[in-house]
Amino acid sequence: MNVFPNWYLFAGASLLMAAAVVNLVSTRKDAHVPARTRHKRWRHLGVALALVVIAVRPTIGNVTTTTYTSGADVVLMIDRTASMGAVDYGGGKPRMDGVRADVTTLVRSLEGSRFAVIVFDNNARVALPFTTDGTAVVSLVDSLEWRTSEYGNGSDIAEGLGTAQKLLARSQRSDPDLSRYLYYFGDGEQTRRAAPQSFEPLRPYLTGSTIYGYGTAEGAPMLTTPGSKQYVRKDGATAISKMNEQNLNAMGQQLQGGYQHRTRPGVLDAHVDHPTLIPVVHRDPRGFETYWIFGLVAAGLLIWELWDDVAYYRRARKEWRWTD
């Protein structure tokens, strides 16, 4: 058994108990004190004693909980070029909606990992450095928007390659034995004239990787901004963005990882390359709280006290009416 006292409550309860003991002793010395008064003072002592025990907070045993950690560094690369506003995901929603849903699912399934987020359009940047705060990752991606087309200069699906390599190299230097994973979210559309760079240089750093693809081969118009009803236009006509699964599959092969075409939110397929979750057992020395039992005892005594007072008042009132 362990105790975790609240000293302020203990001091107050001790004073109440001392007063209850003094009253009870004085009652026992006086033979003329009615039995009802003696019972009341015993109840007062019981309430005070229960409060003392509550203040001490006794516990028994240990509480054991199990959490899971992957012990891995996870890099998320997110395409936020204008084509991610194309409305061919999940029945007419922007592709970025699919990214948000899948990142949320992924982060929740990898509790305990360190996450870093890279976003890229014309340039790549680290939107969130390595953190174990999955809520921060989800909040960031929930607020992420695609870049408006008038500020774009053509999309390069490998724009974030150099930034990812720096992050992974830094992770490897800090802990060579740590597992490292890369997850890429994009549509594979390459609109710059130059061919995309190979992702193969990242392979030596990685334990596993998965490429997530969004969109359709038929393509769809692109919303200018989130929530807008206007579509991107080019040369006087509505521009159509088409996903390029060939590019996405090539990236997966270069990384020796997997590729998935995502068409709706939901549970990620079983073949996704995830870090292994390791159970971590936590033992709480505070054990099982027992103060609530004594709280019930005190409440019962107080209810008894109230019931006795009400009954006494009713009897006294009836006797007063009779004598009147």
Image (cartoon, helix red, strand yellow):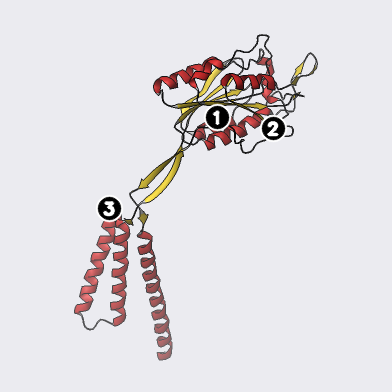
Query: Tag 3 or tag 1, which sits nearer the N-term?
Result: 3
Query: Mark 1 highlights which residue?
Result: 140
Residue 25, above or below 165? below
- In contact (CB < 8 Å): disc 1 and disc 3: no
**Quarter of the picture holding the C terminus:** bottom left
Figure quadrant of the N terminus: bottom left
Q: Which mark is residue 263?
A: 2
Q: Which mark is residue 7?
A: 3
Callout 3: helix, strand or loop?
A: helix
Q: Amino acid at mark 3?
A: Trp
Q: Tell which tag, 1 or 3, sits nearer the viewer.
A: 1
Mark 2 / mark 3, whichever is N-terminal: 3
> Given this view, does label 2 or label 3 mark the residue nearer the observer?
2
Whether residue 147 is visible here, answered yes or no, is: no
Residue 128: % across, % down: 50, 25
Residue 280 quadrant? top left
Q: Is residue 324 above or below residue 166?
A: below
Which amino acid, by three-letter code, is at mark 2?
Answer: Thr
Amino acid type, callout 1 = Leu
Using the numbered discs, state the Cα–Cα distance from disc 1 to disc 2 in whole angstroms: 22 Å
Taking the spot 54% from the left edge, 18% from the top edge, the residue there is 125
